[in-house]
Amino acid sequence: NRHSYEMLIDADEERRIVELLGPEYLDVGLIATRVTGPPRACSVCGKQTEFVDWVFTALARGIHSPEFIVESLKLGNSPQKRVHDV
């Protein structure tokens, strides 16, 4: 039984995600994410970890494209979910 934590996405974070993924992100309708560890502050700057940090990292490292992220979020846990190995 793992604990999970809900991290709400406020208007400011949504704006920053749209800057990274484009306006198509707004079609996703995501209002929160569920993670298995408690939210933490960055050890360097002290900022609270947010979903936008994961999005930024995936894009900056070239792991996923904006289109892939948006499409994956739209599919959620559906059987059509894009399978990949990271």
Image: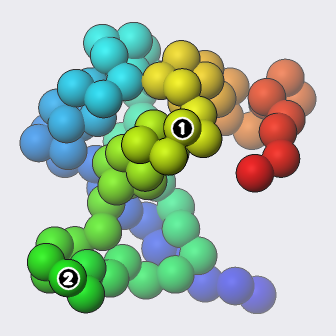
Report the residue marked by disc 1: 62
Disc 1/disc 2 C-alpha distance (Å) = 23 Å
Q: In this view, does 39 lie above or below 53?
A: below
Residue 7 location, x and y as percent?
36, 62
State the image quarter where residue 62 is shown: top right
Residue at image location 85% in from the left, 35% down from the top: 83
- Residue 15 vs residue 34, the one in the foreground: 15
Residue 32 seen in the figure: no
Residue at image location 53% in from the left, 17% down from the top: 67
Dot 2 falls on a residue whose secondary structure is: loop
The amino acid type of the residue labelled 1 equals: Gly
State the image quarter where residue 65 is shown: top right
The amino acid type of the residue labelled 2 equals: Val
Q: Earlier in the sequence, mark 1 or mark 2?
A: 2
Q: In this view, does 61 lie above or below 24?
A: below
Residue at image location 50% in from the left, 46% down from the top: 61
Dot 1 falls on a residue whose secondary structure is: loop
